[in-house]
């Protein structure tokens, strides 16, 4: 899946501490590969 990031997301991401950015990077990578990966905990919106 191709992910696109909004400008507000990018600005907020840059303000995060480096260790949080690394965690977010890992989750976003998993999200791009497999939306149903158990560690993402994504839920379907009804």
Image (tube, helix red, strand yellow):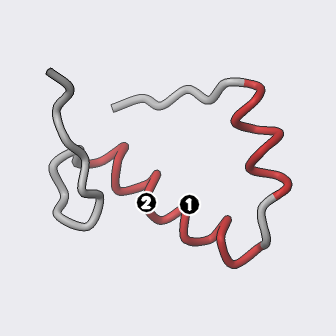
Residue for point 56% across, 60% down: 25
Q: How far across and how far down the image is residue 16, in percent?
A: 77, 62
For the residue pair 32 and 39, the one nearer the viewer reads as 39
Q: Residues within 10 Å of mark 2 (few under 14, many from 20)?
A: some
The local crowd at label 1, few if under 14, some if 14 to 19, many if 20 or more residues have their Cα within 10 Å, is few
Q: Is residue 25 left or right of residue 18?
A: left
Residue 24: quarter of image: bottom right
Where is residue 40? Give x, y as percent: 29, 58
Please tell me which residue lies in front, 10 or 41: 41
Tell me whether circle 1 and circle 2 mark residues in contact (CB < 8 Å): yes
User: Which mark, residue 33?
Assistant: none
Q: Mark 1 = which residue?
A: 25
Q: Is residue 12 above or below residue 24?
A: above
Q: Quadrant of the N terminus?
A: top left
Residue labelled with disc 2: 27
Image coordinates of residue 6 in percent, x first then y, are 67, 24
Report whether 16 appears left or right of 3.
Answer: right
């Amino acid at each position: 899946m191709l992910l696109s990031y909004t400008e507000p997301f990018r600005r907020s991401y840059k303000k995060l501490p480096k260790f949080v950015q690394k965690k977010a990077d890992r989750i976003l990578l998993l999200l791009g590969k497999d939306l149903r990966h158990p560690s993402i905990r994504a839920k379907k919106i009804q």
